[in-house]
Structure formats: structure tokens, C-alpha cells
Image (tube, grey):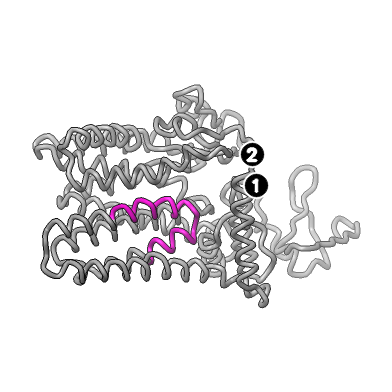
């Protein structure tokens, strides 16, 4: 009973944790007889915001994480389930709150920074370049925004870069110690590849680049004329099948284990139906979106994705969240990719240069063939190899030039990050600040 009036609430296919009733002035109304559902009305937020509610595709992925945890029929089936399994873990630990459904993604976003440091350090063998790469990624707009939203792109990107790191390690090890002494990075690379594919099918794009590098280093090893090459060749063949085909397939299958909690009869035929549905969905999707963009606009960071707008602010304040790339990393990285291509075409590139270009191309080129609605965040994995290209360019400069340039790039990234922080985080700011962020006509996120 509320305000002397009886109230009956009927809920189907949902759970209500707390219910608050307010009068026309917004004040809480005392309730009797509601039990645990109305005993903490003050805990119900006064207004909906990104801090207590889902936004953008969280309504699909965050919801599905909750459904997996509670053995309910899952709603989002257009992507492999591993990313939603990670979201489920966060919800299991911290509850069905914004912190819970975003925890795992934020953790992976944080771990992406030291991974980039390690990748650039191994690629260039220069610690200061690794530090610069880590700092640039820490200040990248897209990494920050994608780490704070409960969607699956952060997981795919993390495992794509981890797979590239393991392949780089493997290639360096093969040239130094042979295939027999390189089984650890080979196996770890297969694990990373499997986890990437089980998070999002963009991991398969990365697999094409990994395959080219895997075969390329075998050719380079043959040119070294080791006495036991054909033994190494057979070992590489068996290892490739075991670690880059069978093991990823097992990992991909294992990502569906939570489905058994709801349906113990879920079998390989059901699994195959999931795969064919995913392919059908993405190949026939005709939906449009006001913030969709084509691949060639991603290169220059032209069309951000507007994720959220806060409509419960005082007059003169604005709050939004958008996904866009950091201008320094994305534009300087694109210039670095072009420079590496020119060096490689002129015969002065080398193996590291070729490897980065291959990884970048195999991540981007498939999107050129996609006709469906696409978004800027689809370029996020490719931007990891823009960062790698930039690291290579810095490493090949004289240190008296490269180090100050790296410091300048990091300083510029920090300044831009502070300026754009409101639209990356949803922080309410005065209207003048918000309007200053719309530096291009296509930056429509307020």
C-alpha cells in the first residue's frame, strides 16, 4: 500500500530488486507491505544515468551476461559467447550493477596497456619505445571508451594483440633457436587466437595475418640452411595443425559451456545452428544507424559513435559518451603505416616492417568487403598495428630525435585526453566546453 492506495505489481521474465514510488514533487512515498522490494527505496537512483543503467549495446551484451549466469535463455546470439562469459564473471562477483557488468572489460582495457608496452618492446628491442607505446595507448580515446562499456570489442582486441605478440615472439625464437625451441610461443599464440575467435569473429581476420607470418618465418628459417630443417618443417606443420586449428576449435567450443546450464541438451547440432545464424545475421543485415561509418572514414577518425546522452542535468550542463579514436595515435599511426609501406616497397623495410603491415592489412581489408552497417570501433583492433607502426618509426630514428618526438606525442595525447575527457567518460560539463569538442561537423555527440 502506498499513500493509502493498494498497488499490485506483476512481473514476468524479469527480476525486480527494489521498487521506489515518488509523488509529483519527486519525493519518496512511504510503502507498507512491500517487504524486501520496498525496504531500501533510497537506494533507487533519482535519475537514470550511465552510472546506474545500461547504454548502447550494453543492453544486449550486459543483459546476456546476466542471463548466462542465471541459466536463462540468452538474448544476444549474433557473436560468439566468450566476451559475454567474461561479462558474466564480473556480474557474478559484483552483482548486476554498472560496476559488475563493466568490471571485466575495464580489467582487459587496463591490461591492454602493458601488453602494448611488451609488444612494442619486443618489436623494437628498445625499452623507451615500449614505454612510449604504452603511454600512447593509455591515453587513446577508443581504448578508454571501449574499456568502460560492457560490450565485447575490448576482449577481441586484447586477444588479437596478444596473438600478434606471441607470433612475434615465435618468429624471433625460430630464427634464433629453430622450431623445436619455439614451442611455447607457438602454443600460447594458438591459445590467444582461439580466445580471440571465441570473443568475436574479427579474431579470424587476425588469423590470416598470423598464418602469413607463420609460413613466412618458416621460409626465412629455410634460408638459414639449418641441417635439420625438414625435421623442423614437419614439427611446424604438426604444431600449426595442433595449436592453430585444433586447440582454437576446442577453446571456441568451450566458450559455449554456459549454454549447458540452461539447456543440458545443447549439442553440436545446436552449436552449428548458432554459427550459421551468426553468419546469416551479419551477411543479410540491412539495418542503418545515424552514426554508422564506412572503413575509409575510420582512417581519419571522422565519424565517432555517440553512445549515450545524459538528459537529467541542470540547465547549462551537458553530458555524453562517444567512441572515437585518439587523434595523435590514430593519425600519427596512419602516417607511420604509410611510411612503412613506402620503405617496404622501396626495399628498405625489413621483416619487422613487413610483419606490422601484414597484421594491419589483414585486420582492415576484410572490412572493405563488408556491406552491412559498420562503426568506428570496428577499427579498434587495426589501431593496435598503427601503434606498432609508430613504434617502429620512432625506433629507427636517431634517439636525439626519436625520444623528444615520443615525449611530444605523449604530451599532445595527454592534453587532448584532458580536453575530450567529458565525452569519453560522460562527465557533465558546461555547455561551452561541450560545444568546443565538436571540432568537425561529423562530431555530433552533444
Residue 243 lies left or right of residue 262; in this view the side is: left
Q: CA distance from mark 1 to mark 2?
A: 7 Å
Count of picture labels = 2
Which residue, given by chain and number where applicable, does mark 1 sit on?
A: 48
Q: Is residue 152 above or below residue 346?
A: below
Snapshot quadrant of residue 34: bottom right
Q: Earlier in the sequence, mark 1 or mark 2?
A: 1
Residue 312's disc is: 2
Residue 356 place in picture, x, y as percent: 28, 45
Snapshot quadrant of residue 308: top right
Residue 443's disc is: none
Return the residue nearer the eye: 112 or 7: 112
Return the residue nearer the eye: 297 or 312: 297
Per the rendered image, the range of residues in magenta is 191-213
Find numbered disc 1 in the image and state the secondary structure of the residue it sits on.
loop
Snapshot quadrant of residue 300: top left
Amino acid at each position: 500500500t502506498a499513500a493509502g492506495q493498494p498497488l499490485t505489481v506483476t512481473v514476468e521474465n524479469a527480476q525486480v530488486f527494489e521498487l521506489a514510488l515518488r509523488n509529483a514533487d519527486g519525493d519518496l512515498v512511504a510503502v507498507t507491505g512491500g517487504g524486501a522490494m520496498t525496504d531500501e527505496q533510497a537506494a533507487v537512483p533519482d535519475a537514470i544515468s550511465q552510472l546506474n543503467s545500461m547504454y548502447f549495446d550494453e543492453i544486449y551484451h550486459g543483459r546476456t551476461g546476466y542471463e548466462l549466469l542465471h541459466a536463462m535463455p540468452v538474448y544476444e546470439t549474433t557473436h560468439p559467447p566468450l566476451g559475454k562469459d567474461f561479462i558474466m564473471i564480473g556480474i557474478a562477483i559484483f552483482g548486476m550493477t554498472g560496476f559488475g557488468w563493466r568490471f571485466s572489460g575495464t580489467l582487459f582495457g587496463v591490461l591492454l596497456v602493458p601488453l602494448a608496452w611488451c609488444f612494442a618492446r619486443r618489436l623494437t628491442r628498445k625499452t623507451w619505445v615500449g614505454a612510449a607505446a604504452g603511454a600512447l595507448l593509455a591515453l587513446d580515446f577508443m581504448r578508454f571508451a571501449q574499456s568502460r562499456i560492457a560490450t565485447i570489442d575490448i576482449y577481441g582486441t586484447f586477444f588479437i594483440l596478444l596473438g600478434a605478440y606471441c607470433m612475434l615472439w615465435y618468429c624471433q625464437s625460430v630464427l634464433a633457436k629453430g622450431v623445436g625451441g619455439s614451442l611455447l610461443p607457438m602454443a600460447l599464440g594458438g591459445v590467444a587466437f582461439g580466445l580471440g575467435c571465441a570473443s568475436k569473429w574479427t579474431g579470424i581476420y587476425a588469423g590470416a595475418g598470423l598464418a602469413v607470418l607463420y609460413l613466412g618465418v618458416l621460409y626465412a628459417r629455410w634460408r638459414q640452411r639449418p641441417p635439420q630443417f625438414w625435421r623442423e618443417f614437419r614439427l611446424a606443420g604438426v604444431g600449426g595443425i595442433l595449436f592453430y586449428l585444433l586447440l582454437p576449435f576446442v577453446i571456441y567450443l568451450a566458450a559455449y559451456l554456459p549454454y549447458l546450464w540452461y539447456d543440458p541438451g545443447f549439442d553440436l547440432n545446436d552449436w552449428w545452428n548458432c554459427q550459421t545464424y551468426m553468419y546469416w545475421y551479419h551477411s543479410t543485415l540491412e539495418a542503418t544507424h545515424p552514426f554508422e561509418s564506412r572503413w575509409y572514414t575510420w582512417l581519419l577518425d571522422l565519424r565517432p559513435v555517440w553512445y549515450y546522452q545524459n538528459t537529467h542535468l541542470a540547465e547549462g550542463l551537458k553530458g555524453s559518451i562517444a567512441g572515437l579514436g585518439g587523434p595523435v595515435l590514430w593519425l600519427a599511426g596512419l602516417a607511420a603505416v604509410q611510411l612503412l609501406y613506402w620503405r617496404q616497397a622501396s626495399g628498405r623495410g625489413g621483416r619487422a616492417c613487413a610483419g606490422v603491415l601484414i597484421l594491419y592489412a589483414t585486420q582492415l581489408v576484410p572490412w572493405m568487403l563488408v556491406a552491412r552497417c559498420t562503426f568506428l570501433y570496428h577499427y579498434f583492433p587495426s589501431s593496435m598495428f598503427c601503434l606498432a607502426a609508430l613504434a617502429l618509426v620512432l625506433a629507427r630514428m636517431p634517439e636525439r630525435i626519436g625520444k623528444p618526438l615520443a615525449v611530444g606525442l605523449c604530451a599532445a595525447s595527454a592534453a587532448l585526453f584532458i580536453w575530450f575527457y567529458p565525452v569519453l567518460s560522460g562527465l557533465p560539463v558546461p555547455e561551452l566546453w561541450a560545444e568546443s569538442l565538436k571540432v568537425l561537423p561529423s562530431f555530433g555527440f552533444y
